Amino acid sequence: MSENRVRTHVRQAAGNLLTDHPALYEARFPDPERLAGRWAEDCLRRYGAPGPRVLDLGCGTGRDAAHLHAAGRAVVGADLSEAMLAHAREHHPGPRYVPADLRSFSVGDGCFDAVVCLDSALLYCHTNEDLHGCLAACRRALAPGGLLVAEMRNGAYFLGRTDLLDAPARAAFTWEGVTYRSVTTLRVDRAAQLLRRTRVWTLDGDSSGPVVQHSAWRLLFPQELRGLLAGHGFEVLGLYDGPGPRTSPPWREGDAPAATADGDRLHVVARAGGAA
């Protein structure tokens, strides 16, 4: 991609520069070891998914869905972004990729043995209505005994801690000859129970000025999440802060789940009960 085209894409990014441009996303967040997919597969084996059928909800670029497919799973990747789905089909073939809004989707009742929801995708459900819609849809999609495996930020981490809020996070990376620089600021919107993010992008040599983008995640607390899952017919098998694909240090093969839920990431595995 030429530098002029890159800058045009930045200017036209109406939503989120990275998620609107999948190749750029993968350049910013490389995962050559497929940690997220391997962690998810470990959970499916550790907690006994009853079969091979997996729905990767919020599949993004398809890297994790493709890893689960290579591990022998029959995978459907679902995402709201047509750009992500097109990238996944071209660059990470194997799974079937379908459009879906995680806040309310229908992929067939009882068609999956597991639903995987990684990288805080669940937290794009900003309201209680959104959350109930997502969990009800997950429950309908699962066969009895099926697993929900999710990984996300931990709302409890922000009770009395400000280290992630005190100073902007700065990052830079180069892709196709263009250096991207970002300054990211987080703040807690307590009334809405959201973690709001402002990210300012600049490109080296671009005189047209920075691009400011906004996004947010719902902040869920461990006991709140337990209650939500129980209300939708799930039994929580594991709920812990690490290790996981985005913890420090990250998860490695053979690592057992911690007994705590206090860190900045939260991981949950829950089993669906009888008929939804």
Image (cartoon, rainbow, N blue to C red):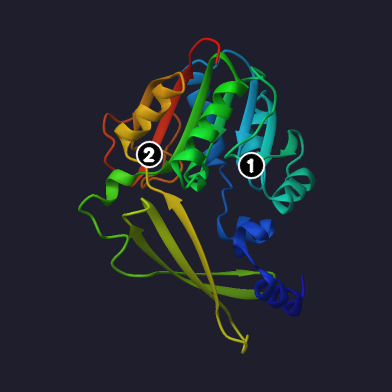
Quick check: 142 above or below 84?
Answer: above
Q: Is residue 76 or residue 52 the one in the foreground?
A: 76
Taking the spot 37% from the left edge, 53% from the top edge, the residue there is 192
Using residue 6 as the reference point, say whether residue 40 is left or right of it.
left
Point out the residue furthest to the bottom here.
207
**As shown in the figure, which amino acid type bears the numbered disc 1?**
Asp
Kindly identify the residue that appears in the image at 44 percent across and 62 percent down.
197
**Picture quarter containing residue 235?**
top left
Say which residue label 2 marks: 266
Please tell me which residue is depicted at 64% across the width and 67% down the height of the picture: 14
In the rendered image, residue 206, in percent from the top left (x then y), is placed at: 63, 85
Residue 256 visible within the image: no
- Among the 4 quarters of the image, the one containing residue 115: top right
* Amino acid under disc 2: Leu
Horizontal side of 211 relative to 195 (left or right) equals: right
Residue extending farthest to the top is 274
Identify the residue shown where x is 65% and y is 36%.
Answer: 65
Between the C-alphas of marks 2 and 1, the distance is 22 Å
The residue mark sitting in front, 2 or 1, is 1
Residue 195, position in %: x, y? Answer: 39, 55
Specify the quadrant that holds the C terminus.
top right
